Image (cartoon, rainbow, N blue to C red):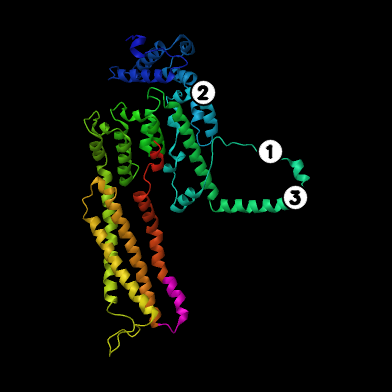
Amino acid sequence: MPVSTGAVVVKVLNSRNYVDWSVLVKTYLLAQVGEEEAADKFKAWRKKNATALHTIQISCGQEAFSLIKNTTSAKRAWDTLAEQFKPKPSKSPVQILNLIKQLEGIAWELIQFCPQLVFTKDQYGEFPMQGFMPSAFLSGTRLKFWQRWIYNCIHIERAISDIRISVRNEGNEKSNPTKITWSVIGFLQGLKSYLLELLGINRIREIKQAHIQSLELLHHMCEVIKHRHGHDFLLPAIFTAIEQGMFEFTDIVLQARPDIVWRTNEMGRNPLMYATECAALQMQREVQWFKEVEDIGIPQIKESNNCDGLKPRELFTKNHKELVKEGERWMKGTASSCTVVGALIITIMFAAAFTIPGGNNGQTGFPIFLHKKLFTAFIVSEAISLFSSTTSVLMFLGILTSRYAEDDFLKSLPTKMIIGLSTLFISIATMMVAFSSALFIMIHEQPWIIIPMIFLASIPVTLFIWMQFPLLVEMYISTYGRGIFDRKMKSRA
């Protein structure tokens, strides 16, 4: 059955519209597939081939048709057109801008000479603002707590603008009478560089420099977009940044264009609603992220509805039911295990208080080693262990009996977990001190056994630090740190 070109595609095939053209033709051919009435398989195939070939031919321009006019196979015609007209990967100016980690300086020069690049799409329909990756910012970089401390101690000045080329003058070096002195200085500098590389400080410095360059480039781009009307070039980038947790990007862009929080995507969702869908973060970071975006946005947005009639908070609750359940399971599992350990320590320390080493004096009733320093250390460490383990158990019981509302993950539950783990660590450490003190009192005449005892007593404490301390530090920073957005950045807004 003959069909008109307009019934298949909007425009005939040319050198610029292969992608759209191929989608339309495929959709049309799929719509033509029905039950085959012909009994002969060859006739059925020939009919399908003729229909497909005819559809392709009438959807081609004159240039494209000349390439397949002698072709009798629809598949061969399709492959020929794909080879000729399918876009080849290429480096567009916008894609060059997207290499922000290695080429920030070049990207900024391009923006200075041609600001319109910020508003230019590439062949895939993406804008330069969408080229920022999570690793371009601190929030998207996984650093251990000691690496983060080094990161904060490193000072880096101007990043993009401070580009210099160093040229060595070999002639002057050869005629320098203080060559030996410079050789010693060079050796010391080389040793310093080796130590910095060995300790990983150079790598952390490079990471921080890349982050600063990315922030500077983003600031420059925001200066370009600040007074520009429209939001098509910015809205996809802000949604992607919120979804991937790029807090710095979101903060800087919203300061430059606060009106963007009013804009909605094709599903009727604004950035505040979109912040409720990020499932990659843990529940605490989710709530923090939602509240930060909520504070930056205009108050009326809190009451706006999406296409399903849900407000941002209602949508947040709906999308995080499973994450709340996972957080509840983890919290209860950890609290249950730690409660058992804390209860055992309470039992042991309570019993040890009435079975002191050396016993009591039969006449006075006081402990025999009452005036020994080790006995004082035993009593003090035992009391601290008992009180801290009791506090730990109470905190974990508070976690087990919590109602596990969304806002509980923000401060209440993390605080209880931090106090519980900290006091449990103190109780274990002081229990080992009490145990070692008691043994020292009883075998003080055999000093050769002291060192092995200290080593063995330190094993459980070391294991606890190795397994739980990173979690404790991370939870403390996440709960009582500066927050997702830098407060200093917000104070300048």
Residue 188 seen from this side: yes
Q: Which structural element holds mark 2?
A: loop
Mark 3–mark 2 distance (CA, rounded to whole Å): 48 Å
- Picture quarter containing residue 280? top left
Q: Which residue is mark 2?
A: 114
Secondary structure state at the residue bearing disc 1: loop
37 sits left or right of 138 in the view: left
Residue 161 on image: x %, y %: 55, 34
Residue drawn 40% across the image and 17% down it? 21
User: Is 194 in front, or is 209?
Assistant: 209
Sequence order check: which comes first, mark 3 or mark 1? 1
Distance from the alpha carbon under mark 2 to that under mark 1: 31 Å
Q: Amino acid at mark 1?
A: Val
Label 1: which residue? 167
Quadrant housing the C terminus: top left
**Prevailing SS of the magenta stretch:** helix
> Secondary structure under badge 3?
helix
Q: Quick check: 481 above or below 126?
A: below
Mark carried by residue 179 = 3
Please report whichever mark, 3 or 2, sits nearer to the chain's N-terminal start: 2
**Where does residue 317 sit, x and y in percent of width and height?**
24, 40
Could you tell me if residue 486 is visible in this image? no
First reached walking from the N terminus: tag 2 or tag 1? 2
- Tag 3: amino acid: Lys
Query: Which residues make up the magenta segment?
Result: 443-456
